[in-house]
Amino acid sequence: MAITGGVSVIGAGTMGNGIAHVFAQAGFKVTIVDVSLSQLDRAVATIKKNLDRQVAKASITEEKKTTTLSNITTQTNMIEGVKNAGLVVEAATENIELKLQIFEELDKYAPKETILATNTSSISITKIAAVTGRAGKVIGMHFMNPVPVMKLVEIINGYATSKEVTATIVELSKQLGKVPCVVNDYPGFIANRILMPMINEAIYSLYESVAGVEEIDTVMKLGMAHPMGPLQLADFIGLDVCLSILHVLHDGFGNPKYAPCPLLVNMVAAGKLGVKSGEGFYTYRAGSKELVVSEGFK
Ligand code: CAA
């Protein structure tokens, strides 16, 4: 089953602009929908900057950049933004009430045959699908950050997702140059069920003074060939996002092994959220690529 119509991406944040970027680069007509005009402008500016980088590295041509940008339009009105969509990919803030409200609206305003995908990192696809009248056409399409670089799309089958819809999304992910991996809908799916306990254990190791920030990250970078250590990766993902995923795992399985480390809880309460707030385990200065351990952990 091929999708008929364009692709609408709901939410113009980091994941939304990355998802719009890869669909547009693969030749799809993309509409980015967000309530904030300034956020939409920022998203297009970021896509342009990332395309410039790809041109500078000769991974795409100047002409490809121009056609990619010409495939993207923006929209602040949800009804207009999804009325011609064959596929909607929701990439709004990771908040269940917000996502349920968005999916109720999508079900009302998108054509009946449109597939509704969510980029949620841990919220139940089955719960999201249940607020629509088309649960068979609701699926998880979990991209990794930075979307233009990371090859994986974790595809999550909700309880009612039809086989035909899964096959369509698998094919579509391949057309984006990604590698799809189909999993079932249980807390954290696969990516975060495995990643978040590792990050939490790294934070516990710091909390219990087993080692410092740099030592923990160096062990995992050089010992396990991870591109970033777990603490740097937590900063990159956002400590608030890590905490909320750990809550989903803890609540969903009822197993104390997923309890978030008190240090993570405190850092989030103090507004130390990682890269996006300028400070987490490391301190981030605009324009600098140097990794500097935050004062409190020196
Ligand atoms: N758009 C386009 N290209 C980008 C980019 C972006 N936003 N960011 C980086 N790149 C490209 C660079 O141009 C460069 O390309 P070449 O290899 O062709 O030269 C390449 O990516 C590497 O970038 P850099 O040299 O600037 O930096 P780096 O080597 O330190 O790599 C990184 C940066 C790709 C982010 C790497 O550190 C990495 O892979 N980190 C781990 C990322 C990860 O684990 N992501 C998953 C997070 S979990 C998640 O997203 C899901 C969840 O639910 C929490």
Image: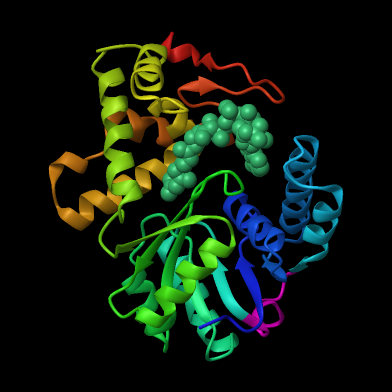
Residue 173: image location, x then y, percent: 52, 63
Horizontal side of residue 197 vs 215, given as left or right: left
Farthest residue, direction top: 298
Number of numbered labels in the structure image:
0
- Residue 279, compared with residue 290, is above or below; it is below
What residue is rendered at 71% in x and 76% in y? 77
Front residue of this view, candidates 4 and 38 = 4
Apparent side of residue 217 relative to residue 18 in the rendered image (left or right): left
Residue 268 image position (x, y, % from top left): 42, 36
Residue in the image at 41% along x and 30% along y: 267
Q: Residue at x 58, y 81 (%)?
A: 3
Ligand 1: which quarter?
top right
Residue nearest the observer in this picture, 41 or 222: 222
> In the visual, does 214 lie left or right of 157?
right
Q: Is residue 147 left or right of residue 179?
A: right
Question: How far across and how far down the image is residue 43, in percent?
Answer: 72, 53
Q: Is residue 71 depicted above or below 162 in this figure?
A: above
Give the answer, above or below, for where 144 lies relative to 204. below
Residue 197 visible in the shown view: yes
The residue segment tinted magenta is 75-85
Q: Quadrant of residue 92?
A: bottom right
Does residue 96 belong to the magenta stretch? no
Question: Which of the two residues, 241 or 125, is positioned nearer the viewer here?
Answer: 125
Q: Which image quarter is the C terminus in?
A: top left
Q: Residue reaching furthest left?
A: 255
Q: Is residue 80 magenta?
A: yes
- What's the residue at 29%, 53% (across, down)? 248
Q: Position of residue 239 (x, y in %)?
A: 43, 37
Is there any visible trace of residue 278 in the rendered image?
A: no
